[in-house]
Image: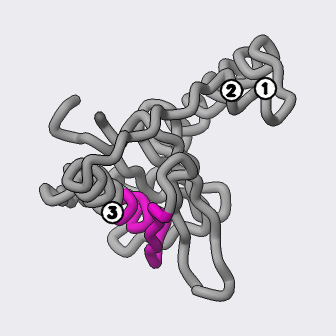
Amino acid sequence: MSHNRYEIVIRWSNEDNAFIAEIPELAGCAADGATYSEAIANIRTVSSEWFKTAKELGRTLPEPARLSDRLSTNGIEWTKLAESSLEFWLDEKENVYADLAKSPARKMWLDYDDAVDVLYVHFEETPASDHSEMGDDGIILDYRDQNLVGLTILDASQR
């Protein structure tokens, strides 16, 4: 079973001074990272080990929670989610393209981490984001002061 089907919850911890990533359906499956992207990469590694250990111990793997179950738990309606997701996606794509067009000298720095199959794309030589947003497509957009400074592409070799 692929860990890509499980919800990953990421939050900032002032106590740990790090991003904390957890998979709620997998008891004890958590990781941290100095950056959002690092926390994602680390939780992917930890979840792979979690699955391996569970299999070795003969434990039944939990099914990923369905989106509809998570929505109903939080009182969100499908139609409202679909509408807001579509609006956000359209607005976000416009913003990304606009940000790319404004990128100084349109330079990019690429870094591929084959251990976790992640491609990092930076639009500044030393990017430092203050917030990130992950889309359902496995692409994380990194921003600083409302400006796109990079993106992270998960499962890069499978695209």
Q: Nearer the viewer, residue 10 or 37?
A: 10
Q: Which residues are magenta?
A: 28-43
Give the residue drawn at x 46%, y 43%.
100
Tell me, for residue 69, which label it has, or none. 2
User: Marks 2 and 1: CB-CB under 8 Å?
Assistant: yes
Q: Which secondary structure, mark 2?
A: helix
Residue 59 is left or right of residue 25, and the answer is left
- Look at mark 3 in the image and give the residue it sits on: 46
Give the residue drawn at x 49%, y 64%.
28
Residue 97 is left or right of residue 105, and the answer is right
Mark 1 neighbour class, 10 Å CA radius: few under 14, some 14 to 19, many 20 or more? few
Give the residue drawn at x 75%, y 22%.
81
Height in image: 7 above or below 150? Answer: above
Q: Residue 157: where, in percent of width, then height?
A: 16, 38
Q: CA distance from mark 3 to mark 1?
A: 29 Å
Q: Amino acid at mark 3?
A: Val
- Look at mark 1 in the image and give the residue it sits on: 72
Height in image: 64 above or below 106? Answer: above
Give the residue drawn at x 22%, y 29%.
159
The chosen color scheme is: one colour
